[in-house]
Amino acid sequence: MKKKIIALSVTGILALGVITPAASTALAVGNGPSYGGNESIQTSNLYTYEGMVEYLKKQDAKQDALQIEVIGQTVKNRDIYLAKYITNPSNPTVLFLTQQHGNEQLTTEGALEFIKHLGTNKTKGVLENVNILIVPMLNADGAMGDVNFSLEDYIADGGRHLTRYNAVGTDLNRDHVDKIQPETQALHENVLQKYDIDYMIDLHHQGTDYERDGKLVSGSMLYPTNENVKPEVLVKSQKLGAVVFNAVDSTGWGHIGKYNGGSGENIGRNGAAVQYDIATLLFEMRGMSDHEDPSRVIGQKSNGYLIKQTITTLDATVRAIADDSIETVDYSFWDTLATQTIRESE
């Protein structure tokens, strides 16, 4: 048994299941408020890097199945953490990656809540059949606004800004071939190359004004699109997408479009699929926590639903892998899923 430590109070996370169906219908993510320019967008209700570390240590002390590993350091020497549940190395393994872009944080909030979720009886039997790896904040410098360039034009209040880029202005999700940045090197050398990973979901955020079939989306998805992805890896990726789509799009408040993404190997979902034969899925949640472009920032009243969407995604994925239902899921929906488009300004 792990030695217990005094639990520290951590705020800002949504408890699983607190949103009622009625509330979910009334305030569906896709119809939630975007930033209109008059209200305050706060970062103070989001985990700081230090708060995330405290939270991980708290859960590590409480959960016997959980191990915390430092996989490397950021440009500004912040430790990069991996949360892992490995009960049987021969089990299929899934990796959840968040915050390659530092201003896309609600997926991190959901991933942290999911870690707590894994320590309860709600996922009884799952960990015996699937190994789970979670990198909850790859770009900690960007998430803390600790960068070597100005963020004075960014919108959010609350003590810090969050930016897409790492400390030296690099987009980490375009560094998966050259692997120049220490954050990308850590991910590849100490996670993607170290563990035998079968599936990966790369969690991001997009702008607020995308729609599918005339309705604003709560997010969008895409499998790897590089020409060098093996056919069997592509099929596994599309099945992974089917699991997530079925779980989220059926909720009544989730509404998913197809993402229009690039095919370069330097992009995370493509690089992992080509270089390591990992089945990958990009999931872009609606709205960002901070940005210099108002159209990309979402109002805080949508935070809870986007966090819940992340938890739903992670939970459905591990269950489908654990019970092997991912192998038989119908993934033909990709043939008819409409690519999201930008809604014209009214």
Image (cartoon, helix red, strand yellow):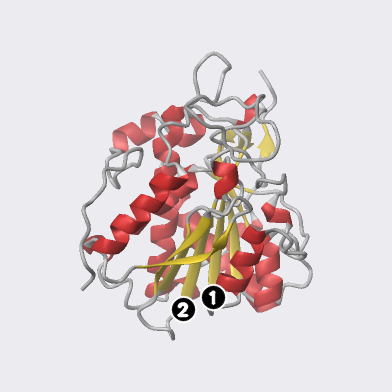
Q: Residue furthest bottom?
A: 90
Residue at position x 65%, y 60% in the image? 182
Please say whether residue 229 is visible from this viewpoint.
yes
Residue 183 is situated, as x and y percent measured from the top left of the image, at: 62, 59
Residue marked by disc 2: 92
Around disc 2, counting alpha carbons within 10 Å, would you say few (fewer than 14), some (14 to 19), or many (20 or more)?
Answer: some
The quadrant of the rendering that contains the N terminus is bottom left
* Amino acid at circle 2: Pro
Q: Tell me if label 2 and label 1 are in contact, CB under 8 Å.
A: yes
Q: First in sequence, mark 2 or 1: give its number.
A: 2
Q: In front here: 98 or 205?
A: 98
Residue 127 is situated, as x and y percent measured from the top left of the image, at: 33, 73
The quadrant of the rendering that contains the C terminus is top right
Residue at position x 52%, y 59% in the image? 80
Measured along the vertical axis of the image, is residue 22 above or below residue 131?
above
Around disc 1, counting alpha carbons within 10 Å, would you say few (fewer than 14), some (14 to 19), or many (20 or more)?
Answer: many
Report, in whole angstroms, how far the alpha carbon at label 2 lies from the one at label 1. Answer: 6 Å
Residue 152: quadrant of the picture = top right
Measured along the vertical axis of the image, is residue 282 above or below residue 169?
below
Secondary structure under the numbered disc 2 in the rendered image:
loop
Q: In front here: 107 or 232?
A: 107
Residue 312 is situated, as x and y percent measured from the top left of the image, at: 40, 52
Residue 31 is situated, as x and y percent measured from the top left of the image, at: 49, 29
Residue marked by disc 1: 198
Residue 88: quadrant of the picture = bottom left
* Amino acid at circle 1: Asp
Residue 184: quadrant of the picture = bottom right
